[in-house]
Amino acid sequence: MGRRSIHTPDELRELIIQSATDIVEQDGLSGLSAREIAKRVNYSPGTLYNVFENLDDLLLTIEARLLDQLAHRLDDIDTTGTPQQRLCRLAEAYLTFTQDNPKLWNLLLEHRLPADREIPDWYRAKLGSLLSPLKDALTPLLDGFDTHDKEQAARTLWAGVHGITSLSTTAKLSPITNHAAGQTVGDFVTTYIAGLKNRHAD
Amino acid sequence: MGRRSIHTPDELRELIIQSATDIVEQDGLSGLSAREIAKRVNYSPGTLYNVFENLDDLLLTIEARLLDQLAHRLDDIDTTGTPQQRLCRLAEAYLTFTQDNPKLWNLLLEHRLPADREIPDWYRAKLGSLLSPLKDALTPLLDGFDTHDKEQAARTLWAGVHGITSLSTTAKLSPITNHAAGQTVGDFVTTYIAGLKNRHAD
DNA sequence: ACCTGAACACCGTTCAAGT
DNA sequence: ACCTGAACACCGTTCAAGT
């Protein structure tokens, strides 16, 4: 036993993250266990706890990577056309991303930290940065509004898109089918923007 | 052992549901276990499985009751005033309900059925009926739209409100604080309705 | 008919003991 | 320093055995 050093600490960390991600991608959160990960990376369960505090930390790492991927997808959206077009593209990209990664996205929705654990700041920052492209695209529509209202509009837009996508992937709360989600997102963004213009006109 | 018959089957069923609900209300889904329920109702764990197929079934029952409660709350909303006012009241009631029952509401979001289990029709029906008050309130705003568009608008409204409330109670995905949720819901409903009018005017 | 509780196959996490 | 694997305190679920 002891001291194998087949992998550097970083390699081992990456191996664990990758295996855990694979498991969630295949079988969802319920298929994940420390023992199963250990089996796949060919280390004992105890070794996981040299690398991560616990499973929650490992999962938070996986979730953060997923947020990063989404952020990149949103950054790559082209910024031509009207604000409406841009916002629709962003919303669509968000929806497509969740549909491309259903099991991993569900992880984000299902996995809760224990009540006594705070969400780390670096994680919160990632969330915040997802709003930036939305804010940018909204700006031309909102020159009559103050900063607070702009932030608010971006959050509302985010929440709406999130609501539709999460409802479409969960089914337990939803009269929205996965298939119709695209239409619903489109309806939402278009109508909400039309409403902003209305308010602006007042 | 065996055959105590202190409680009728119905009483026992109710007892189990009540204890499980208490546990979730106190400690959330993660605090729940068959053994803990059994301890509280003073029966052995095995007895639970005479009454329910498994824990998922018990949880589905609890969730259905929660949906019923919410439906009643929405039915009791007064129907006076403009459509906007009615819709705002409905959205606010939804939000308030989730904030009044945070742990139980979270159960609805966290608890997933195993992949091989379909959501039962009676459960789906309850979901559908939650949309009715929304549709009723929307109708006056949508006489230029066909049935499909009305359904669509109701679903979008539902999804938006759901998105905001669920983001505000989860924190893991959310730049929206619990405190600001009311404002966000109000912003959303008002702006979305303004957008509908705009579309109508086209 | 109804209920028990041991049993089975799992968990997450810790930590003394090994190299 | 790094890793093991037994151990602890749990799980959900089943089912022979009891009354």
Image: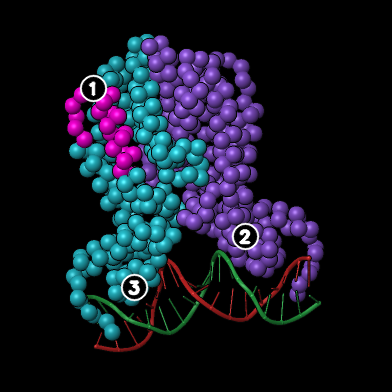
Chain colours: A purple, B cyan, C green, D red
Report the Cα–Cα distance between label 1 and label 2: 54 Å
Q: Is residue B122 found inside the magenta-colored segment of the image?
A: no
Query: Badge 2 sits on which subunit?
Result: A
Can residue A173 be seen from the camera position used here? yes
- The amino acid beneath tag 1 is Thr
- Asked if one can make out residue B116 in the rendered structure from this viewpoint, the answer is no
Amino acid type for the residue under numbered disc 2: Glu
Query: Of residues B80 and B10, which is closer to you in this image?
Result: B80
| Residue A69, quarter of the rendered image | top right
In the image, what residue occupies the spot 20% across and 24% down? B81
| Above or below A149: residue A201 | above
The residue at which mark 3 appears reads as: B39
Instruction: Identify the secondary structure beneath mark 3.
Output: helix
| Residue corresponding to mark 1 | B82
Tag 3: amino acid:
Lys
Per the image, the residue denoted by label 2 is A53
Q: Nearer the viewer, mark 1 or mark 2?
A: 2
Residue at x 49% of width, y 17% of height: A142
Can you say whether A100 is above or below B66 in the image? above
In the image shown, does A198 or A85 lie closer to the viewer? A198
Count of numbered labels shown in the rendering: 3
Q: Quadrant of residue A139?
A: top right
The location of residue A88, given as percent across then percent down, is: 52, 24
| Left or right, D7 with reference to B174 | right
Residue drawn at the location 27% of the way across and 51% of the way down: B65
